[in-house]
Image: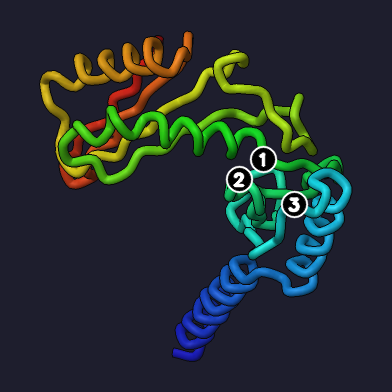
Amino acid sequence: MKAILWIIGSIGTIVIAIILLFIYEMTPNASLETKAKELGDDYIQKHFDGQAEVYDVLYDNMGNHEFDYAAKVTHKKTGVNFLIYETRDSQVMKDTYASSYYEEQLERDLQPFVKDMEDVVSHLVHISDVPKYQGEDSLPDLKDLNFVPNVIIDLDRAALDDDEEKMEELFVFMKENLRIERGGGRFVYDPSSGDEMLQMSY
């Protein structure tokens, strides 16, 4: 009996330790958050002439990005929200202003197409990092660049037979109306439908 109680106690201790470790890993460090804000403020003064402000900090506790902490920033003139951060491995300062700027522009430009679709929950545009324009807020017109944006449309429904045709219509709109020569699209269906996302490119 004592051996059984000892085993149960040991297992309980291990489980509690795992839970406490998980909570610790998920909880942001206040001093590192402060450092991220200070780095963001310094970066803004050097590269954006003070024309932006830090409003929060993003803590990446899942390792999805190349940083642990990033300053969440709003550009005062354009209203674009973006990130400023120090990379985890190389300690290089970076910002996502250019990609966020063009993503928000494309999301607005796509609104006329998306509003005619049924069951749309949201639509987002993803553009990979734009290293050429790090630290710059004077950006060229989108049509003068060669970006390959990916449009992600969340749908509150299952897949339909004509979804590939609808995706092709999206690509025609992007090419003819937005002058985007290459791009991609993704329809993400209601998880309860069991349907896999539809992903295409042109």
Secondary structure found at label 1: helix
The answer to whether residue 104 is seen in the rendering is yes
The residues tagged by marks 3 and 2 sit, at their Cα atoms, a distance apart of 10 Å
- Which mark sits nearer the N-terminus, 3 or 2? 3
Instruction: Say which residue appears at 13% left-offset and 19% top-offset.
Output: 162
111 or 25, which is in the foreground?
111
94 or 100, which is in the foreground?
100
**Position of residue 195 measured from the top left corner of the image (x, y, whole percent):** 20, 33
Q: Which residue is mark 3?
A: 51
Badge 2 density bin: few <14, some 14–19, many ≥20, Cα 10 Å: few
The amino acid type, in three-letter code, at marker 1 is: Tyr
Q: Which residue is mark 1?
A: 97
The residues tagged by marks 2 and 1 sit, at their Cα atoms, a distance apart of 11 Å
Badge 1 density bin: few <14, some 14–19, many ≥20, Cα 10 Å: many
Q: Quadrant of the C terminus?
A: top left
- Which mark sits nearer the N-terminus, 1 or 3? 3
Above or below residue 188? Residue 182 is above
**Furthest-left residue in view?**
161
Badge 3 density bin: few <14, some 14–19, many ≥20, Cα 10 Å: some
Closer mark to the observer between disc 2 and disc 1: 2
The amino acid type, in three-letter code, at marker 2 is: Thr
**Position of residue 20 measured from the top left corner of the image (x, y, whole percent):** 59, 76
User: Mark 1 and 3 residues: CB-CB less than 8 Å, in contact?
Assistant: no
Above or below residue 160? Residue 49 is below
The amino acid type, in three-letter code, at marker 3 is: Gln
The image quadrant that residue 169 belongs to is: top left
Q: Which residue is mark 2?
A: 78
User: Mark 3 and 2 residues: CB-CB less than 8 Å, in contact?
Assistant: no
Secondary structure found at label 3: loop
172 or 89, which is in the foreground?
172
Instruction: Say which residue appears at 38% left-offset and 33% top-offset.
Output: 152
The answer to whether residue 69 is seen in the rendering is no
